[in-house]
Amino acid sequence: MRSCNVGIIGFGFIGKVHAYCHVNMPFFYDPAPCTTRITHICTSRIETAEKGRALVGAKKATTDYREITENPDIDIVHICTPNYLHKDALLSAMAHGKHIYCDKPLTATAQEAQTVREALDSYTGIAQMTFNNRFVPATLRAKQLADDGFLGKLLGFRAAFMHSGNANPNAPLKWKLSKKAGGGVLPDLGSHVLDLLSYLGVGLAEVLAAEQIAYPDRPLPEDPAKRVKVDAEDSVFVLARTGEGALGSIEATKVATGAEDELRFEVHGAQGALRFNSRNPLVLEAFDASLSDQPIGGRSGWTAIHTGQRYPKPAAPFPGSKLAPGWMRSHVACLAHFLECVADGRPADPGIEQGIYLRELMDRVERSAAQGAWVRV
Ligand SMILES: NC(=O)c1ccc[n+]([C@@H]2O[C@H](COP(=O)([O-])OP(=O)(O)OC[C@H]3O[C@@H](n4cnc5c(N)ncnc54)[C@H](O)[C@@H]3O)[C@@H](O)[C@H]2O)c1
């Protein structure tokens, strides 16, 4: 079995999740796609890097990402830093032929994505974006059904990702609410929704967007008495049309009071419909329009397809296929897919190209919100 050394750049919220997935991979996949060992942890401060190093038993803690991207002993580079730092780490890792697991979004701006596109020609590694919501069993089943033609001609769609964290006016202004750092709810949550729609075959041709900053200023994390101006959106609502004329809505918000990490999508076709809500991760709901609604209802109606934790082999039935899959399990499956691709030497999906596509799509959404007009994708 292939064995890979791993360096993780950024060890905050998501860096730890990526590390957990490596450490626990052999529980969930038998055999594991490849053996991995986390050797390097990089953060902005040596104290936090050292804490991360000790947690995963890595060899080295550093504050310089190049100690990872340029290191000949490292095979796989994880990019888990704030969005404005992705580009430089990506370009360096690409130039050194590393395999790359980059969390979303690819870069902070479409311009930066363009420089990554230019580097793709000479890139020899395998790269994947961390769009973990593709790797929920219900979503995987939705993709199978959509590809099999279950929906027929697409008529409409609606998708939303809702959090409530920014509803509090005193929530501090961290990097995710700073434009300069590549923040805003569009890259943060909206990118997941846009990726899912694209995964399910909803190809957007034009968008009309509006954004909201719920509070004009927020406290600085290091000095809560001081309030600073907020310039990145808390909410974005998008009307969108596909090239074939299907109309739908897309929403990403962090001011949905009462919401607890709720991701939902619905796609409606002439022959059927599919819907999913992450608060009920055990099932995908499907509606087959060919079933008769006579007499008194016939067999017509929404069916709950039990997808549970039914991951395809080589996933091991751990802890059990009937149990609810969690958010963390989707991250394990997302990383497993990447490692399989690395082991087999085949391109990973969603790859860097998808990251570029989504970054450009988000640029169009931002442009539409600024102009208050429909923008072609
Ligand atoms: N796929 C998902 O489910 C998901 C969830 C959350 C975040 N993310 C993405 O993960 C990335 C990180 O988000 P987060 O929530 O973990 O942020 P975070 O603020 O919790 O962590 C950021 C990490 O980057 C480090 N860092 C900052 N500046 C650095 C520098 N100059 N050099 C090296 N390290 C530096 C920090 O020390 C910290 O360890 C973002 O791109 C975000 O969009 C993805």
Image: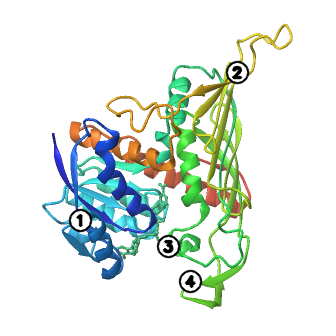
Q: Which mark is residue 259?
A: none
Mark 2 secondary-structure assignment: loop
How many other residues sit within 10 Å of disc 1, few (<14), some (14-19) or many (≥20)? Answer: some
Q: CA distance from mark 3 to mark 2?
A: 43 Å
Sooner in the amino-acid sequence: mark 3 or mark 2 = 3
Residue located beneath label 3 in the image: 181
Q: Is the residue marked 3 within 8 Å of ligand 1, measured from its CB?
A: no
- The percent position of residue 16, horizontal first and vertical second, equals 39, 62
- Image coordinates of residue 115 in percent, x first then y, are 37, 60
| Residue identifier under label 4 | 221
Q: Amino acid at mark 4?
A: Pro
Question: Which quarter is ligand 1 in?
Answer: bottom left
Query: Is residue 219 left or right of 183 when viewed as pictured?
Result: right
Please tell me whether mark 1 sits on a helix, a strand or a loop. Answer: loop
- Badge 4 or badge 3: first in the primary sequence: 3
Instruction: Report, in whole angstroms, how far the alpha carbon at label 4 lies from the one at label 3.
Output: 15 Å
Circle 4 SS class: loop
- 213 vs 204: above or below: below
Where residue 5 appears, as percent x and y from the top left, is 19, 56
Mark with earlier residue (1, 3): 1
Which of the two discs, 4 and 2, labels the residue nearer the N terminus? 4
Mark 1 to mark 2: distance in Å? 54 Å
What amino acid is labelled 2 in the image? Ala
First along the sequence among labels 1 and 2: 1
| Dot 4 and dot 3 residues touching (CB under 8 Å) | no
Answer with left or right where residue 265 lies relative to residue 10. right
Q: Is residue 139 above or below residue 84?
A: above
Residue occupied by mark 2: 270
